[in-house]
Structures are given as C-alpha cells and as structure tokens.
Image: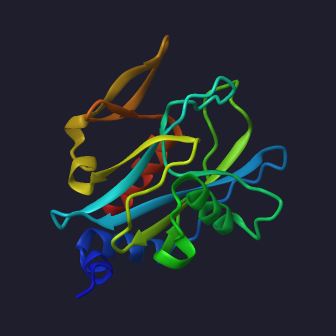
C-alpha cells in the first residue's frame, strides 16, 4: 500500500475527506478585501501518524504577521486562475512544493477574515491537501522555518490554552515545542480538527 493510500485509510483522514466532500465552503463576500489562500498540507509521518505542516513567517517590519506561525499561503495575484491556484503557487514560492504534481486536494474549509482591528482587509480560503512522501522543503526568504506536527499532538486539548500573544492581547492558542499558534491559523486549525473529531 502506498503512503498516500495509508494516509487516506487513516480513520481520521478518511473522516475529514468524507466531510469535506459532502459540504460547501462558506464564502465571505467582501469586495473591499483582498483574497488569499493557504494550503493545509498533511503527510504520513515516520511513526505512521498523519502530520500537518506549519511555517514560521520571516521577520519583516512591514508585515503585520511577521514571525507568526502560519500555513503556507498568501494573497491572490492577477495571474492566478482561482484561489486553488493561489494556494498552489504560494506553496511552491515558499517551500518549492509542487502541489499540482505531488499532492491531492481533498477539500476546502470556510473563508476567514482577521478579527483584530488594524490588520489589512483580507479573506482567506484554506485548502486541504494530502502529500505522499514530501521532500524536505526549501524555504524562500519569506519563511524562517517549517515543521510538521503529528495529528494526535494537535488533538491533545491539554496544549491549548488562553495565552498572552502580544502585549495586552490574550487569545486561545496551541503550544508545541516553543511555538505558539494563534489568530487565523488557530481558527483554521480548530475548524479542521472539529471536523476530524
């Protein structure tokens, strides 16, 4: 059995794939907002558990999400045919992952917008991909680092708690080996875990 077949046969991934196939993405219609897409990449880890990829964004003074943990992705460009193309292009630009060739799209999660005032107006659409045996990513200048987190670790509620993420701002966040996942990334992740669980 191939690693992709083993990944798809995992009951949690099978449940996610089935649920995504039977639902439509809730779209946010905001003509004044930029559209963006992220790719949630899932592989079968060395221990046989599904794992999800996260990146840490590089530090840039003018980037409001500078240094934060995120999924690969970014804003839609004029040449993108649709938001699926945006997610695929961004994953290649940031990690040199060719999702069109080396991944299987299994569905789309609901659109999200930032909840914090002062952030750019953007609507983000998350796409869920399965990857068979991905190589080590090659980081662009936009990515400081990347790491895979096993699904059972993400589903362990003991590592989720209210956290002071920046001065004067407390948010529900996931903690893993010194990384803190909060904001839209946490909301996307929590939405997907709710489908799995």
So how many labels did they put on this image?
Answer: 0
Q: Could you tell me which residue is drawn at 34 percent across and 33 percent down?
A: 179
Q: Residue furthest left?
A: 47
Q: Position of residue 59 (x, y in %)?
A: 56, 28
How is the protein colored in the picture?
A: rainbow
In terms of depth relative to the viewer, which is nearer, 70 or 154? 70
Q: Residue at left 33%, top 79%?
A: 4
State the residue lying farthest toward the top.
168
Along the viewing direction, whichever of 140 and 103 lies nearer the viewer: 140
Is 41 displayed left or right of 32 in the figure?
Answer: left
Residue 21 sits above or below residue 173 on the image: below
For the point 49% across and 11% down, the residue is 168
Place residue 33 in its image quadrant: top right
Apparent side of residue 107 relative to residue 150 in the rendered image (left or right)? right
Of residues 41 and 89, the one nearer the viewer is 89
User: Quadrant location of residue 152?
Assistant: bottom left
Q: Quadrant of the N terminus?
A: bottom left
Q: Give percent across and percent down for residue 197.
A: 29, 59
**Residue 5: where, in percent of width, then height?**
29, 83
Residue at point 60% right, 33% down?
Answer: 115
The image position of residue 84, as x and y in percent, is 64, 68
Extreme bottom residue here?
A: 1
Residue 145 horizontal side relative to residue 13, left or right: right
């Amino acid at each position: 059995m191939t690693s992709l077949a083993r990944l798809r046969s995992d009951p949690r991934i099978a449940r996610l794939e089935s649920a995504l196939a039977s639902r439509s993405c809730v779209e946010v219609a905001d003509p004044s907002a930029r559209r963006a897409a992220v790719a949630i990449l899932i592989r079968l880890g060395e221990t046989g558990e599904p794992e999800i990829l996260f990146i840490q964004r590089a530090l840039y003074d003018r980037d409001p999400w500078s240094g934060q943990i995120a999924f690969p992705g970014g804003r839609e460009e004029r040449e993108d045919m649709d938001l699926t193309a945006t997610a695929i292009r961004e994953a290649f630009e940031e990690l040199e992952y060719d999702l069109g060739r080396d991944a299987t799209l299994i569905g789309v999660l609901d659109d999200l917008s930032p909840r914090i005032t002062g952030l750019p107006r953007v609507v983000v659409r998350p796409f869920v991909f399965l990857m068979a045996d991905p190589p080590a990513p090659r980081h662009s200048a936009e990515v400081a680092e990347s790491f895979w987190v096993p699904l059972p670790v993400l589903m362990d509620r003991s590592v989720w708690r209210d956290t002071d993420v920046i001065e004067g701002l407390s948010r529900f966040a996931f903690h893993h080996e010194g990384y803190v996942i909060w904001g839209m990334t946490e909301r996307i992740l929590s939405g997907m875990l709710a489908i799995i669980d």
